[in-house]
Image (cartoon, coloured by chain):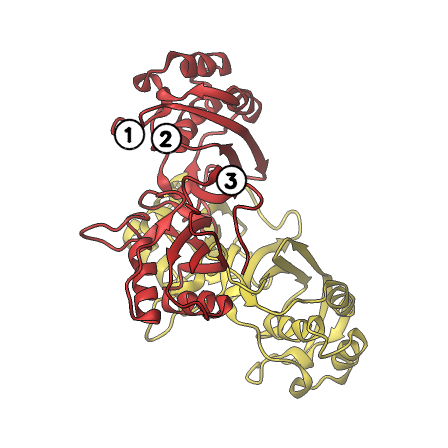
Chain colours: A red, B yellow
């Protein structure tokens, strides 16, 4: 059995998705839960390796399970019960043996939240970046729209990113406001390391009037990381969904 | 100087507003911050004594300060900096000497959040009650509307409530849904102990089909606490605002 899980987590207490020599990770917590439940250790593969402090509501995780008669809702409930409260296993499905959560993905969607008010809020303090000065939303929206399409995103790539090819296709890039809460949503075929956080750090500079939307567009074209703004803090970022083509999942 | 603070807090880690012999409280945290800032201990009075685990985004707190030349934004910033991250001092204003945050209040508004889905969510886990079974929103709305007006709310009073008079006027009582998140909003002249949580526990029984809206209305009229549903957990409750008449606050 090849099982696909849809997993939600608050990243605050974790050193990211991937197992680390020191410090708790989401992968370690899930693999330990599966080891306790099934008596054997299975390697879990995720669609996206979220960084330390980054959250997910729609991470996709796959693992092999040698239990052909296993009930999937029992798998879901068991893994959910055996992981801490800040990890929730939302769904368990059967998928084809060759389904790869990362390579089979058509696109990913991330949200980045900003609490834009003089005073912070306790409600969103773990899930939003607090920016005190007022942000110009139309300017940020104009800049965000300049990211759409297939482009070389070297300007927003982390210095230590080892991607061979920095070209990605951005399908959606928009920002909306609900009172003091700004939510930036970006969907792309794939992302470079720190790409969303580097984009948001630079969009905030546009919102503060430190760059114009035209300068933002020119920055993309320059393909030079040293020109972009700072990396926004991880706590505002959330992996919302991973999209696959219909038929990728074979139901039991 | 009589100072009015508007305070936000996540109640998760606290034994409620009021100072307790053992366990941290919001009042203790604020009084300690003021003592550190001004060198003297001031007693802080709140508009509503929220219970253990209950949150606030608009609690109103007053205290006397013998510093006529003090800058209010400095007071706000100092108290905010000296309290833990789960307490935020949003505003500081001058008010008349006879302003009493509780007695001068015209009404209070509370919100109660329910996460209504099979699977919980990490995003709202500290601020919403997770109810797995689907809730019938129109039935709950009909029941909620029956609370409007001036009534004897003995049916929703905690057993240990020491109010002399259980009559309160409910000005707003409505429930709305945004995907899996239900928010119940209630405004009343004042509240009895556990009143909102007892109402919500009973509204959920209506939503589950265990009571009809008509039975809910009859329950109010019965004025008998033993007939109402269970007390909803504190984490879904939030004191949103305390309303005062114009002119109650004298600006500096």
Q: How far is disc 2 from disc 3 in space, using C-alphas? A: 53 Å
Crowd tier of the residue under label 2, counting other residues whose Cα lies within 10 Å: few below 14, some 14–19, many 20 or above = some
Quadrant, the N terminus of chain A:
bottom left
Q: Are marks 2 and 1 in contact (CB under 8 Å)?
A: yes
Residue occupied by mark 1: A161
Nearer the observer, disc 2 or disc 3? 2
Tag 3's secondary structure? Answer: loop
Classify residue A79 by image quadrant: bottom left
* Chain to which mark 1 belongs: A
Q: Is A25 placed above or below A102 here? A: below
Nearest the eye: B62 or A217: A217
Classify residue B70 by image quadrant: top left
Residue occupied by mark 2: A192
Q: Residue at x 32, y 20 (%)?
A: A225
Residue B33 image point, x, y percent = 33, 54
Quadrant, the C terminus of chain A:
bottom right
Q: Earlier in the sequence, mark 2 or mark 1?
A: 1
Tag 1's secondary structure? Answer: loop
Q: How far is disc 2 from disc 1 in space, using C-alphas? A: 7 Å
Nearest the eye: A19 or A51: A19
Residue B154 image point, x, y percent = 68, 81
Q: Residue at x 44, y 27 (%)?
A: A204
| Same chain assignment for discs 2 and 1 | yes
Tag 2's secondary structure? Answer: loop
Q: How many marks?
A: 3
Residue A212 image point, x, y percent = 48, 14
* Chain to which mark 2 belongs: A
Residue occupied by mark 3: B252
* Whether residue B83 is visible: no
Q: How far is disc 1 from disc 3 in space, using C-alphas? A: 55 Å
* Whether residue A171 is visible: yes
Nearer the observer, disc 1 or disc 3? 1
């Amino acid at each position: 059995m090849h099982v696909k899980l849809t997993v939600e987590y608050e990243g605050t207490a974790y050193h990211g998705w991937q197992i680390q020599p020191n410090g708790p990770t989401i992968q370690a917590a899930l693999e330990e839960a599966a080891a306790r439940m099934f008596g054997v250790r299975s390697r879990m593969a995720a669609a996206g390796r979220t960084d330390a402090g980054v959250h997910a509501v729609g991470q996709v995780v796959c693992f092999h399970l040698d239990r052909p008669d296993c009930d999937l809702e029992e798998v879901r409930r068991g893994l959910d019960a055996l992981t801490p409260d800040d990890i929730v296993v939302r769904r368990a499905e059967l998928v084809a043996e060759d389904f790869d959560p990362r390579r089979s993905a058509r696109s990913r969607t991330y949200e980045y939240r900003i609490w834009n008010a003089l005073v912070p809020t306790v409600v969103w303090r773990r899930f939003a970046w607090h920016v005190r000065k007022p942000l110009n939303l139309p300017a940020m929206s104009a800049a965000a729209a300049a990211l759409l399409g297939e482009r070389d995103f070297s300007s927003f790539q982390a210095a230590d990113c080892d991607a061979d090819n920095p070209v990605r296709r951005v399908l959606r890039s928009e920002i909306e406001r609900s009172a003091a809460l700004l939510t930036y949503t970006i969907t792309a075929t794939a992302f470079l390391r720190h790409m969303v956080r580097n984009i948001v750090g630079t969009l905030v500079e546009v919102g503060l009037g430190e760059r114009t939307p035209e300068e933002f567009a020119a920055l993309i074209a320059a393909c030079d990381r040293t020109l972009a703004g700072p990396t926004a803090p991880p706590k505002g970022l959330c992996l919302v969904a991973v999209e696959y083509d219909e038929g990728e999942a074979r139901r039991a």
